[in-house]
Each structure stands twice: as C-alpha cells, then as structure tokens.
Amino acid sequence: MKKKTNNQDVKTCPVSRWQMLKATLTNLSLEEFVERSLNDPEAQVLDVRTKKEFLDGSLDGAINIDYLSPDLADELEALPRDKAYYVFCRTSRRSIRICIILQNAGFDRVYNLDNGLQSDEFI
C-alpha cells in the first residue's frame, strides 16, 4: 500500500503492529479461555488491568498484576514457570504486551483472551 506524504510516495505496512504481535500468541475466545483455564490443573488466570478495574469485577480465580504498576517486571519475574498463564484485560492491548513479555522471558504456556473483556461474548 502506498501513501502520499509531502509529495513523496511512502510504503506502509497493511498489517498493524498489534496484529503482528497478536499473531505470535495463542489467542482464545472467551469460551475457550474459560474452559481451558478451568480444566488445566496448572492454570493461573492473570487480570492485568488496574487495581480499580480488578476490584470492580474480574473472572473467578484471577489474580491481579497491574500492567501500570512500577513493580510489574518484578511481579512477572516472580511467577512460577511451571504454570500455564491465561492473561486478559479490557481490550487485549495490555494482555498482548504481557503475553509477549512472558514468552520472551521463557514462559512456555501463555494464552491471551482475544479482544479482552469487551468482546461480544463477555457483554
């Protein structure tokens, strides 16, 4: 795709950065996310929204690791590596980032809730 900028042709990528990052993850629908996390004995559900969002309501059994926390890196590093992590937020932007961080840190089983809690399935 080409775009005109200041009388110059500039090539742009038709795939957004979010789509590229998301494509590297295992993305689950809400139904799959809940079913798999409930049936996985090693599952840990991570709600990476703010503390206020978490206190307003979350998925059963989720623990809160606030994406905006200054201690985020330490909290993620402290997670046991033998667990499977099911990660979600409101829109999936924060959860995508957290899943990428976990994968890059060597966590093997990381799952993202596709489209977050705002998905049509949740509403």
Image: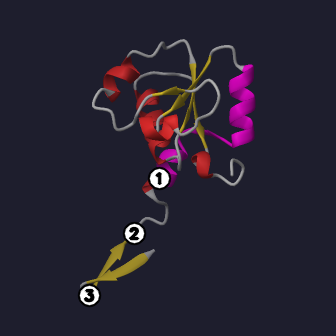
Tell me the crowding category of disc 3: few under 14, some 14 to 19, or many 20 or more residues within 10 angstroms, Cα based: few
Q: Looking at the image, is mark 3 or mark 1 nearer the viewer?
A: 1
Viewer-side residue, 9 vs 75:
75
Q: Position of residue 114 (x, y in %)?
A: 61, 45
- Amino acid under disc 3: Asn
Q: Residue at x 72, y 49 (%)?
A: 121
The kind of residue on which mark 1 rests is Trp
Most extreme residue toward the bottom is 7
The span picked out in magenta is: 18-39
- Residue 37 image label: none
Q: Residue at label 1?
A: 18
Q: Distance between the Cα atoms at labels 2 and 3?
A: 15 Å
Q: Is residue 87 magenta?
A: no
Q: Secondary structure at mark 1?
A: helix
* Category of crowding for the residue at label 2, using alpha-carbon neighbours closer than 10 angstroms: few (below 14), some (14–19), many (at least 20): few
Instruction: Count residues near mark 1 (Cα–Cα under 10 Å), then give few for <14, some for 14-19, many for 20+.
Output: few
Residue 44 appears at what percent x and percent y? 58, 21
Please name which of the two marks, 2 or 1, marks the residue nearer to the observer: 1
The quadrant in which residue 6 appears is bottom left
Report if residue 24 lies within the magenta region: yes
Answer with the quarter of the image where residue 74 lies. Answer: top left
- What residue appears at the point 34 percent right and 83 percent down from the top-left corner? 4
- Left/right placement of residue 99 relative to residue 36 reads left
Residue type (three-letter) at the residue carrying disc 2 = Thr
> Of callouts 2 and 1, which one flags the residue occurring earlier in the amino acid sequence?
2
121 in relation to 107, above or below: below
Q: Tell me if residue 8 comes above or below residue 65 in the rendering.
A: below
In the shown orientation, is residue 59 left or right of residue 81?
A: right
What residue is shown with label 3? 7
Measure the alpha-carbon separation of dots 3 and 1: 28 Å
Q: Which residue is mark 2?
A: 12
